[in-house]
Amino acid sequence: MCLTIFVFLLLAARSSAASLTFSNASPIVINDSLAPPVAAAPYPSSLTVTGFVGQVVSKITVGLYGFTHGFPSDVDILLVGPQGQMTILTANAGGQNRYSVTNLTLTFDDAAVSTLPIYTRLASGTFKPTDGYAALGYPNLPFEFPSPAPAGNSNSPTALSVFRNSDPNGTWKLFVVDDVSGDGGTIAGGWSLTVSAAVPLQIARIQTNIIVSWPAAATNGTLQTATGLSTQWNNVMNTPVSNSGHFYVTNAMNGASKFYRLIQTP
């Protein structure tokens, strides 16, 4: 039993990631009325992701271009993926006083150093998704994004990692609302989505063999192995076997730790 645990701890698999950026440059008008939350126009703003074969999301980032508003903390933005996963990009951020902004470029990235400011003026930059209501002690948003946003969106997380391991292909939707009356704005340059995706590798030990598998839709990959991440990688010469929608490669164990990766070619 100890040997089995030891072997699994030393096995690792990964695949090379491809990154593509998709954009919708049409302006988003942030409407305002005496009955918030008010949907922007269009609502939602959508873009279509295509071209990822047999791959799943490893990371995404979102860009907003030309953000202008008289009271930025009135603006709330929800991102919904093709399979229905949701994340709040921003809510109640950018100052609790009237800190108007003009023509900002905002990038949302889980790996950013900081969140959006809650009490001070917004500036262009890269930020973690930010829920200012949570920072003020609210358990979730005090309202729902109106339909056709999916129900239950008021307690969506503020993390782009919710899309990890999902199929990136399909329609992504950006829902923008203004939740307090008195000010409007625009996202004049629209928005973009940068998707990094990779083939999901699975690895298992069966008796004295290592089985590495991946979706058969990814037909352009070369499986490689190494004894360490900084050592030389060598192509696995065993021919993949196709079965039930996956490729399988069987390698005999030789007592050494193993790392596997799938290198994809265009």
Image: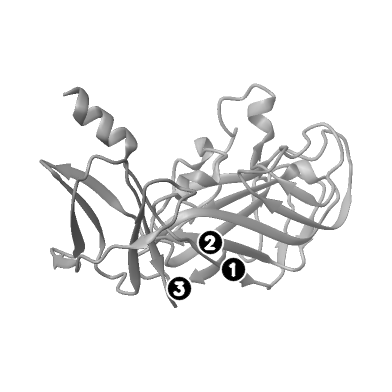
Q: Which residue is under mark 2?
A: 195
Name the side, left or right, on which 40 lies relative to 32: left
Per the image, the residue denoted by label 1 is 21
Where residue 164 appears, as percent x and y from the top left, is 44, 49
Distance between the alpha carbons at the discs numbered 2 and 3: 10 Å
Q: Amino acid at mark 3?
A: Thr
State the quadrant of the C terminus: bottom left
In front here: 111 or 38?
A: 111
Distance, label 2 to label 1, CA atoms, is: 6 Å
Residue at 46 percent across and 56 percent down: it is: 81
Residue ID at (34%, 69%): 221
Which numbered marker is on residue 95? none
Q: Secondary structure at mark 3?
A: loop
**Label 2 neighbourhood size at 10 Å, few (<14), some (14-19), many (20+)?**
many
Label 1 Cα neighbours within 10 Å, binned few <14 / some 14-19 / many ≥20:
few
Of mark 2 and mark 3, the one earlier in the sequence is: 3
